[in-house]
Image (cartoon, helix red, strand yellow):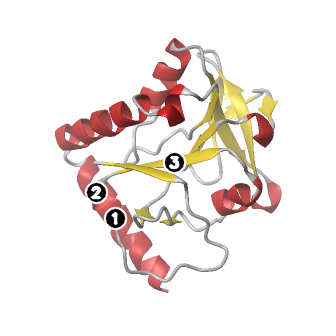
Amino acid sequence: MEKERLRKLGLANLKWLHEHPILKEQKEQEISQALFNDPYWQNAETIAITKPLDFEFNTHLLLEKGWLEGKNMLMPIAGSKRQLTFHSVTTDTKFKKSAFGVAEPISAPVVSAEKIDLVVVPGIVFTHEGFRIGFGGGFYDRFLQQYKGESCSLVFSEQMQEHWQVETFDLPVKRLFIS
């Protein structure tokens, strides 16, 4: 129940920030620049991100920068058994809305987890140790169990909540970029 309460609070904070677009865009620029200047980004050739909902971090900045730098940019498809597969996307990739309301690539080539250098993991609430509360499906926790590459999250300070009980299946991302 604690996670559900924090999820609602986190969503309210994200929606509040979305209603203040100048502040949100400023924070997105700061966080993106910190990521772009970091070895996590600079050393990665294949990067997985999500296509955001309106109130989430605008990952289109990352997509465009990745393509400009010749990186292989990936986006997930949520499959059966709450498993994610990541697919290579280009400017020509078509998307469709999933049952969760998230845009997923159509007919894009699958890339195995072993070939992904960096996964940018979405979330709603975070601790400074990298633990996160997402939308509740456990897709990224399942993926992170077997993923050996680098992981990070792009976090607004409004999403930080330190006091909640981490569960055994919760897996932290390795790095947070916060503004």
- Mark 3 residue element: strand
Choose the circle earlier in sequence order: 2 or 3.
3
Q: For the image shown, how many numbered marks are present on the structure?
A: 3
Name the residue that disc number 3 marks: 152
Q: Is residue 26 left or right of residue 1?
A: left
CA gap, disc 2 and disc 1? 6 Å
Query: Considering the numbered disc 2 on the image, is that residue within a helix, a strand or a loop?
Result: helix
Query: Which quadrant of the figure has residue 74?
Result: top right
Circle 1 residue: 160
Numbered badge on residue 157: 2
Q: Position of residue 152 (x, y in %)?
A: 51, 48
Question: Based on the displayed image, in which of its 4 quarters is residue 48 positioned?
Answer: top right
Please indicate, yes or no, whether residue 27 appears anywhere in the rendered image: yes
Examine the rendered structure and indicate whether residue 95 appears above or below residue 99.
Answer: above
Label 1 sits on a secondary structure element that is loop
User: How far across and down, in percent of the image, does residue 86 sit?
Assistant: 72, 39
Q: Amino acid at mark 3?
A: Cys
Q: Are marks 2 and 1 in contact (CB under 8 Å)?
A: yes
Check disc 2: other Cα within 10 Å, few if <14, some if 14-19, many if 20+: some
**C-alpha distance separating marks 3 and 1:** 15 Å
**Which residue corresponds to the image point at 70% horizontal and 27% vertical from the top-left?**
88
Determine whether label 3 and label 1 are within 8 Å by CB.
Answer: no
Residue at the (50%, 33%) spot, across then down: 39
- The 10 Å Cα crowd at callout 3, few under 14, some 14 to 19, many 20 or more, is many
Amino acid carrying mark 1 in the image: Met
- Identity of the residue drawn at 48% across and 42% down: 52
45 or 26: nearer the viewer: 45
Q: Give percent across and percent down for residue 155.
A: 38, 51
Which one is in front, 5 or 122?
Answer: 122
